[in-house]
Amino acid sequence: MAADEASTPDSRRAASLAPLPDHRNVDTPWWQELWRRHAHITTPLRARGLQCDIEFGLSAYIVRVSLPDDSCLIIGPPQEPSSERPPGDPEGWIATREHPDDPSLFEVLYDSAPSADPGAPQRPEARHGGNAEPLIEAIDHRLAQLGLLPPHESPHVRSVQPTPPPQARDVPGTPDRAPVYVYGNALRALTDRLNGAQSHADAAALLHQILEPTDGLLAQLGEFFEAAGEKAKEAEEDDGFDLSYDLADAAAEIRNLAEVLHVAEDRMRALTPLVPAPRLSSTAARAPSLPPRVLPPAQPRHTR
C-alpha cells in the first residue's frame, strides 16, 4: 500500500485524499488491519486534507490527526479503564486537541464515552456512543471555528449528477413507456466515467464515490436495505418479518463488502500505468522479426 499520488489533475482534485502516513509499518499486515478498522474515521478526515495515522495510546489504539498549526487531534476510546471491545468499534469516542510543545493547549472536542461514574452528568454527545458521523461533524465544526481546516474540498461535495432520462420516460407507468431508473442511470454514468478515466488517480477518485465509508454508495446502499427491512416489519403478514431478515442480511453483506474493499482506492491510486512500446522506425521494420519475449508471471500481492 503506497502513498496517494499528489499529482491529481485539478478537475479531479476534489476527490483526492490526504496522503497515507510515511513509515515502514504502512506495508505490514497488522497495521493495514488497524487502518481498515479505523477507515470510517480516517477517510472522512483525509477527505478534508488532514493527515492521519494509527498509534497505540495508553491501553488502546488511537487515530492521530496532524493539524496545520502543528497541534494534533487524538481520537480514540477511553484509555482508562481499558475496554475489551475491538479496535475501531468502541462504546464511545473521545477527541482532544493537543500540542506536543505546549502542554497548556488541551481541549476536549468530543466525548461520547459512557461515564464511569453513574452519578456524574453525561455530555450531550454521549447518546451517540460509537457512531462516527457525529464525531466527524463535531471535529468539522470546531476546526472551522479555529481556521484549521486545510483548503480542500470534500470529495462528496461534487456528487455525480444523474443522467437526465429522455422526455418520453418522464411519467413511469404510462403505456408504452419504460419506468425511470434515475439511480441506475447515475451509476451507469459513473461507470462510463470510469471507463474513460485518463489515469489511475482518476479511477481512484471514482472508486471513492462508491467506497467512502460515510457518504459513499455502498454505505448508503446498506442504509437503504436496512430501512427497507424496517419498513417490511410494519406489515401484518408473517412474511414481513421474513423479508426484513433477508433485507438485513443484504445490508450486512454490503457493509462487509465495503470493509473488504476499503483500501481499493489507495491501491488503485498507487498503480503505475503500462509504458507503451516505442514505435519501430522504417529501418527497424525491415529487420527480421524476433520471437516474443516471455515475461515471468506477476507475483500476487497479499494486501488487506
Image (cartoon, helix red, strand yellow):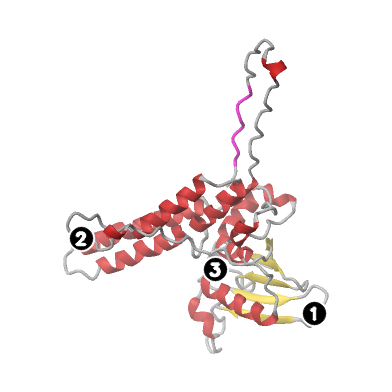
Q: Nearer the viewer, residue 81 or 28?
A: 28
- Front tag of 3 and 2: 2
The picture places residue 7, in percent across and down from the top left corner, at 69, 53
Q: What span is colored magenta in the figure?
A: 295-302
Residue under label 3, please give it. 90
**Res 173 label:** 2
Residue under label 1, please give it. 103
Q: Give the secondary structure at mark 2.
A: loop
Q: Amino acid at mark 2?
A: Gly
Residue at x 57%, y 68% (from the top left corner): 83
The picture places residue 179, in percent across and down from the top left corner, at 26, 57
Rendered view: 102 above or below 229: below
Q: Nearer the viewer, residue 286 or 52?
A: 286
Residue at x 50%, y 65% (from the top left corner): 214
Mark 2 or mark 1: whose residue is earlier in sequence: 1
Residue 12 lies within the magenta run? no
Q: Give the secondary structure at mark 1.
A: loop
Q: Give the secondary structure at mark 3.
A: loop
Rendered view: 146 above or below 279: below
The picture places residue 62, in percent across and down from the top left corner, at 65, 66
Cβ–Cβ below 8 Å for labels 2 and 1? no
Label 1 packing within 10 angstroms: few (<14), some (14-19), many (20+): few
Residues under labels 3 and 2: Cα distance? 48 Å
